[in-house]
Amino acid sequence: MLWGFPVDRVVERQTGELEALTEVAKALVAPLELPELLEAVMRTITRVLEQAEIGAIMLWEPAAGVFRPAAAFGYDLDVLKTIGLRAGESITGKVFDEGRARLLSAPEDVSRAMDDMRPFNRQVMARSLGSQALPQSAVAAPISAGSQRFGVLILESLDGARQFTEERLPFVQTLADLVAIAMERERLEVRADAVREAHQAERMRSEVMAALSHELRMPLATIKGYATALLMDELGWDEAKRQEFLRLIEEACDDMEGMIHDILDSSLIEVEQLGLELEPVRLPHLAREVAAEPFLPRNGIRRAGPGGPAAEMQRRSQPHHLVVDFAADFPIVHADPRWIKQVLRNILDNAVKYSPEGGLIVIHGETRLSDVVISVADQGIGISSEDLIPLFEKYFRVRSVSTLHVPGTGLGLPIARAIVEAHGGRIWVESKVGEGTTIFFSLPRQRPDEERP
């Protein structure tokens, strides 16, 4: 006998506890997410503690000012998650405030500790347990690491013949401490991730500002240079040369205006202010309108000059030949025509800029069962496989010797992606270096409120 207990019983209990702690320790070093780890802890407890018929890990949510369950056994966790224990309420609140493990060895002790539980929480507990019966005994331990308090581990017995005893307190507290270690590790990892993300965001912000400043300086330098030249009367520019300088200044202004519009559109998307106004749209008509309009400043392309849109289009189509290819019975889709035009402009802008030698650009429409697919194919320089993945990320620009002097912000395709996805579609690209690029985007054939299972 040892302190009133048979030696073999004590050894058996201690062996079981050691095995349980070993299992929990293994879970701590395993690549498990926190919810999985907490569930593993609860499963281990049910195997080792025969008194523990029900139990929960209740975590404190400072923002809400309540305790909520993160893991449980013996309860319906989905139902139990609707409970919200206030500070100091029931066994959980009292143990959290006291900061030490507590044993409630008799039904009357449990009842007294639960006297202040609000009626709604009592109802939730009964529903999640499937019974109105109160626990016959309970043991609870605070989950804390240093000054950081996370919550409470609470274990309860429904069978009066299997009550918790004092010698179980150190083991339950050790389990709670292991849970606290996992919680603290998670907290520190989240903080480290937040710091890394903040540093990365700051670095990206600096790089973006540097890139945008560089891109905006290029047209500014053009404007400044040619405007200064025009002001030098002593050089005696003839009218043809003056007109050429003015046209170059206008193009540089259009480049800047296009970049600024892209930045503003991107800002609208970031604050979720896209503002779609869906209406029946004939995409072939929309595509022909975009193909026929002058190169707009939003695209970093020239406005119509003195010769009007037709003359401008003639200049535009000298190196590039645009073809719009849609079937006569192409279906009407519900979309925002203003934003879909912007998608087409941004994709066409890329097709033109990255096929500097000209060639054929085809806007093609294809009908599928539940959506339509629009593609814009060029015969340009193409995109390498490593550049395809980040192509739709903000500020990313394909870099090659042939594109070093192509103006832009790297926002055109990310904006197009955001618009297409807001419509319920998707956008993707296929390309081969030296052979050209095709960008596809899909749009649903039905309005979202017309969709059927």
Image: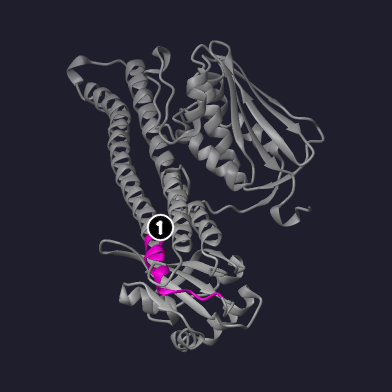
Closer to the camera, 42 or 260? 42
Pick out the residue farthest to the right.
Answer: 329
- Image coordinates of residue 293 in percent, x first then y, are 57, 32
- Image coordinates of residue 142 in percent, x first then y, are 36, 68
- Image coordinates of residue 318 in percent, x first then y, are 55, 15
Left or right, 168 with reference to 375: left
Rendering quarter of residue 170:
bottom left
* Residue at image point 27% right, 37% down: 206
Q: Is 341 above or below relative to 128? A: above
For the residue labelled by badge 1, is the local secondary structure a helix, a strand or a loop? Answer: helix
* Residue at image point 41% right, 49% down: 25
> Label 1 belongs to which residue?
179
* Residue at image point 63% right, 83% down: 132
Left or right, 235 with reference to 108: left
Rendering quarter of residue 207:
top left
Left or right, 279 with reference to 109: right
Report the magenta stretch's main SS: helix
Badge 1 density bin: few <14, some 14–19, many ≥20, Cα 10 Å: many
Instruction: Name the amino acid type tagged 1.
Output: Val
Question: In which quadrant of the rendered image does the N terminus lie?
Answer: bottom left
Closer to the camera, 23 or 236? 23
The magenta stretch spans residue 120 = no
Q: Is 82 above or below relative to 245? A: below
Closer to the camera, 44 or 449? 44
* Residue at image point 39% right, 35% down: 259
Give the magenta range: 162-175
Q: Is 52 above or below relative to 389? A: below
